[in-house]
Amino acid sequence: MDFLSYFISGISLGSIYAIIALGYTMVYGIAKMLNFAHGDVIMVGGYMSFMATTNFGWPPLLSVLFAMVVCTVLGILIEQLAYKPLRAAPSLAVLITAIGVSYFLQNAALLIWSANPKSFSSIVPFDSLRLFGGKLIISGTTIVTIIVCIVIISALNTIVNKTKVGKAMRAVSEDKDAAQLMGVSVNKTISITFAIGSALAAIAGVLLCSAYPILMPTTGAMPGIKAFTAAVFGGIGSIPGAFLGGILLGIIEILGKAYVSTQLSDAIVFAVLIIILLVKPTGLLGKKVLVKV
Amino acid sequence: MLNVTGIQVFYDNIHAIKDVSFHVDEGEIVTLIGANGAGKSTILKTISGLIRPAAGKIEFLGHSIVNLSPHKIVRKRLAHCPEGRRLFLQMNVRENLQMGAYSREDVDMEAELAAVYERFPILDERRNQRAGSLSGGEQQMLAMGRAMMAKPLLLMLDEPSMGLAPILVEQIFDLIVELNDAGTTILLVEQNAEMALSIADRGYVLETGSVVTTGNCADLLNDERLKKAYLGG
């Protein structure tokens, strides 16, 4: 029963990683850049929801919406101000800029909310689920996290595969010039991608703080790196890959904590990444594109 | 319909296009021919907005299109079917065709798809297959079908015969003539100069970024110098 309990916690943590990894992987797929500030958008989402519930006394759902709106605007602003001017620049310049934006967000948060951790109360109002006569207890937050992740993945899958915007995103991701020749605005598509990724980061931030209720300016950093790992693990650029990578990473981390060592759990996570990349450099679901002439 | 006047294009320090001028009138098939590296593809990319010229004017239907983004130029119904086809290989055949109509509003998608499938039955058979799984010939048909979906007034084709078997080359050229008869003006870039001149009205011969000769196709086909350089005898 313990194993099952750990396993479910792993899926729940993995769901959060998956939601964050989606943002990484979509932005990478379309703008061909690693947005290392993505993790810090999660933190901003957490603070926004915290402010909405604690300072303004808003209901939980409204606080999530508020966090999503703020993060969406923030994501678009970051892209417009920091990344768009570098569209033709070498990728190293963009990468360094992304790290700069990450530090900027962390330090701005430090200035606004101070270094003192805020204790975040879960926005999930449901009671825990007790199964097998109380032997297996699953918290409401865990259940909601998993459900939200499934809903997000299905919605995103529909958007990407069935809508015109989604087709434009796939077209830009595969061949930017050809997409433009079809009439797709690359700038607009990149903005939309940042908007979606950042809105998801806000949701992830609220779920993360609901499960691990300590909110600090660095709250987003580690989950951000791990979700990036998850995206690479699944095959960066691939949406199903981000989902799979996130879930697997969550399970490995929790089982590692439970059965090996709490201190070593992060090391295990990154070791698994290294092994996967040695065996399959494109990640689990990464595609190798064959070009026919 | 299309007026290109004195365009200059540089790749870093390489002067790729040197003061090129030409025009395409409504209803014509005009071809740009020349050896590899003469600048034919660069000219098309400059017209469709993928490359910015350093100087010169490009007018389409009387309006300047220099400095417009490519996605805005295609909305003026000037389509560019690029070299190497540039299909979306991860998308299926149907989605590639739908992308072709991306720039248009109020499209009756099913009717338009049916028209392409009628022209290329093989695409209908393969509509749910990824474009990357098609043969080279099928991919070229898909590229032509995708260009048809854009319903352009002026269609620029870059090396549509590249890498195809002779029988397919003929099919593609038949289609170009058909599209032209149906009212689409064509600007055709080809290395297969003989084929191109056989269907075009006028031609421009390019050498290292400049227009060296121009004229009616019949005259160009009989040009002794040209025969030696491009027509194999």
Image (cartoon, rainbow, N blue to C red):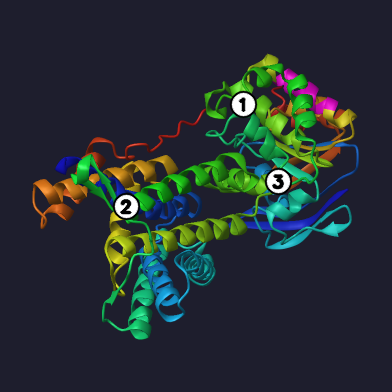
* Mark 2, other Cα within 10 Å: few <14 / some 14–19 / many ≥20: many
- What is the distance, in whole Å, between disc 1 and disc 2 at their CAs? 48 Å
Amino acid marked by disc 2: Thr
Q: Chain of mark 2?
A: A
Amino acid marked by disc 1: Gln
Q: Residue at x 46, y 54 (%)?
A: A27
Q: Residue at x 68, y 59 (%)?
A: B53
The answer to whether residue B195 of the structure is visible from this angle is no
Q: Chain of mark 3?
A: B
- What is the distance, in whole Å, between disc 3 and disc 1 at their CAs? 21 Å
Point out residue A115 in the picture as x, y percentages from the top left corner: 27, 81
Disc with the residue nearer the chain's start (3 vs 1): 3
- What is the distance, in whole Å, between disc 3 and disc 2 at their CAs? 56 Å
Residue wearing tag 2: A142
Point out residue A201 in the picture as x, y percentages from the top left corner: 42, 60
> Which of the numbered marks, if any, corresponds to residue B139?
1
Residue wearing tag 3: B44
The quadrant in which the N terminus of chain A is found is top left
Q: Is residue A215 magenta?
A: no
Point out residue B119 in the picture as x, y percentages from the top left corner: 77, 21
Q: Nearer the viewer, residue B217 or A218?
A: A218
* Mark 1, other Cα within 10 Å: few <14 / some 14–19 / many ≥20: many
Question: Is disc 1 in contact with disc 2, using a CB cutoff of under 8 Å?
Answer: no
The part of the image, by quadrant, that contains residue B188 is top right
Asked whether, in this view, residue A10 is left or right of residue B176, the answer is left
Q: Nearer the viewer, residue A159 or B11?
A: A159
Asked whether, in this view, residue B168 is left or right of residue B151, the answer is left
The part of the image, by quadrant, that contains residue B12 is bottom right
| Whether marks 3 and 1 lie on the same chain | yes
Q: Nearer the viewer, residue B228 or A254?
A: A254
**Which SS class for mark 2?**
helix
